[in-house]
Amino acid sequence: DDADGQKLKQVLSDEGIPTKTLQTVKGKKTRRVFVTRTEDGDREFAGFPDDTSNFADCSFDMAQIDGTMLYAADFLVTGTLGLAYPETREALTQLKQFCMEIGLVRFVDVNWRPVFWKQPEAKAKEIILEYLQGASLIKMTDEEAMWLFDMDQDQVLDKPATILKRLEGCVGVLVT
């Protein structure tokens, strides 16, 4: 319910994107992520406070979702950052199950950012891999694919179908 959240909602509305399912959380800010590039082109993420859990995206509430909208949808797009936070992880897990039950195509953008996770890296990896199961389409960077599937960069970039074989129900993997 902050100024950044209101501005984001207005931009979405101005672009004709429905905001009916947009959730606001009293007392929690809209997260801002700043991305810069190193001289060799690698991305660096900045702007994170020590406590990364006091943002609205950490409090996704499945009870606020109008299930009829999911029946009318052609697909659902989610990321994995929310899996770092128990409340949002529970909601995303429920959404995953619901999508599987109604046959809704689920697209997942893997966003591995260790700074958001309080759990050990091995536990975070386990949670993300479980969430990916059953997704129809998955997008991830080569670094994320290497981390998740214990593969080297050549394997990831030259044989992404190897990843596809490890993901039940997945029909496409995009490695960037």
Image (cartoon, helix red, strand yellow):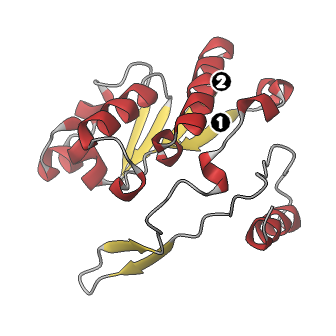
The quarter of the displayed image where residue 20 is located: top right
- In the image: residue 173, left or right of residue 163: right
**Residue 10 pos. (x, y %):** 85, 67
* SS for callout 2: loop
- In the image: residue 26, left or right of residue 126: right
Residue shown at the point (43%, 46%) measured from the top left: 110
The quarter of the displayed image where residue 159 is located: top left
Amino acid identity at mark 1: Leu
Residue 118 visible: yes
Say which residue label 2 marks.
104
Image quadrant containing the N terminus: bottom right
**Hey, which residue is sitting farthest bottom in the picture?**
39
1 and 2 marks in contact (CB < 8 Å) = yes
**Residue 3 pos. (x, y %):** 79, 73
Vertical arrangement, residue 101 with respect to residue 157, above or below: above
Amino acid identity at mark 2: Leu
Earlier in the chain: of badge 1 and badge 2, it is 1
Vertical arrangement, residue 150 with respect to residue 25, above or below: above
Say which residue label 1 marks.
76
Image quadrant containing the C terminus: bottom left
Residue shown at the point (85%, 51%) measured from the top left: 18
Residue shown at the point (48%, 75%) measured from the top left: 47
- In the image: residue 60, left or right of residue 130: right
**Residue 12 pos. (x, y %):** 80, 62
